[in-house]
Image (cartoon, grey):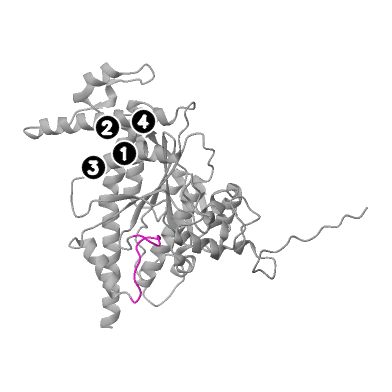
Amino acid sequence: MNHRHDPPSLPKGFTSVPLVENWLGGFPGGNGKPLDALQGEEEKGGDRDAFSGTSSVSQFSSYSNPAEREAAMRNANDLPLRRIPLEEFLALPSVDPATTLLVQDLSTINQKIGVLPRVLKPLFESQRSILDYLNDAMFTTSAVVGDSLAESNKNLEFQHKRLLRIRKSSLQCSDPARPVCWAEWDNKVHAPILELALDTVPVSDQAPVFHNIKDEKIAVLFRDPNALLRDDLADYGIFLAPAIASPLGSLITSSMRNSRYLARFNALENFEVDRPLAIAIETNRSRAGDANAPNRLANFARAHFRVVRHLFRHLNLNIRTRETAAAETQPSTIPKPPASPPMLPLPLIEVVGSAWRISFAILDEDHVIVSSDLAMGSTEQVSDCYVLFQSLVRLVRWTESECTAWWTGRLQESFKQASFRYVR
């Protein structure tokens, strides 16, 4: 028997079967509208999912098969992805010693060595849980002495109360009998502990800030042309926010003034263009079954390094590629340019319910390489909260020092090169 299969009717306005890049109707998350129309509606604030708060285009990315997305990044024409163990990552020539020291410190903190304030030891022992083992090696003595000791103890007591509140909220959010949406996790657990860690940094003109970037979009210039990878974003970003009068702030201002086009220091379309991204954070509910978080973070890192590559090529910085690496090995009578400085890695934090893990991404030649991850702590037990808190504090200090120094040094070098060419 012959079965007649009629071709599917085409949507109004189409004269031929649309390509995958332009048509989302046949995929999970698609709603039968062309991509341009979806983007237009997103700009108007329409066609958004009431629960997730994400656009239909983003849903197309987030609901696709993680294995397909991973393969798409691995085989991409621009900045393909490689994943390697953390030990191999730290051995890369493009990774600086400060990153190795950061990982070592995070590993030590994760072992719960010296993470609890000894001055609060009686309080910890009175509140201890049978599931939260304590020993003397977990306590450390504050180096503060003199008149500021009392103020330091007050701050420690305040931090302890905040962490207890965060842990209680975490237990409530993870209760399987009363599941909550991602917004409650973010508002009661994830954002408060980020704020607490950032508050430990003294107020200065170099202090980093964090922002919720769920509703932002990748700027067109830095998007991947593949529809599977087009709109990946993290949930939070920690950014450098230097004051205009600071060394880095003045360099950023000068580069924006001297640029033929407006220089962008992050990949976000509707965000402060003069704030470089330092850390990307993706948060998910426990038991949410979201296997796309590593994909999304890796792809967002690719967009970030497109910014670095575009910005510093525009400023004529020496970005190492396969071609330049091969040229360095060839004999030549022409003086070679100085070796490329170490590239600044981008920490990628994945949060699933109460558990936090960190990996690192870096631009190496023409690949983006992502390391395996490392535990940072959790909000499940009080001592775990302190491990997470101390890990975040260490990351914030790394951001304030190493990130600021890297961006300052690269921009200074770019202006030197530009001045040298002008004089010649």
The answer to whether residue 1 is above or below residue 148 is below
4 or 2: mark nearer the eye: 4
First in residue order: circle 1 vs circle 3: 1
Labels 4 and 2: the sequence-earlier one: 2
Find disc 1 in the rendering and name its residue: 192
* Disc number placed over residue 162 in the picture, else none: 2
Residue type, label 4: Ser
Contact between labelled residues 1 and 4, with CB atoms less than 8 Å apart = yes
Which comes before the other along the chain, label 2 or label 1?
A: 2
Q: CA distance from mark 3 to mark 2?
A: 12 Å
Disc 1: CA contacts within 10 A as few (<14), some (14-19) or many (>=20):
some
Magenta residues, start to end = 260-271
Q: Is residue 77 visible?
A: no
Residue ID for mark 4: 169
Residue 207 placement, left or right of 260:
left
What's under tag 2, amino acid-wise? Arg
Decide whether the magenta segment is chiefly helix, strand or loop.
Answer: loop
Q: Mark 2–mark 1 contact, CB under 8 Å?
A: yes
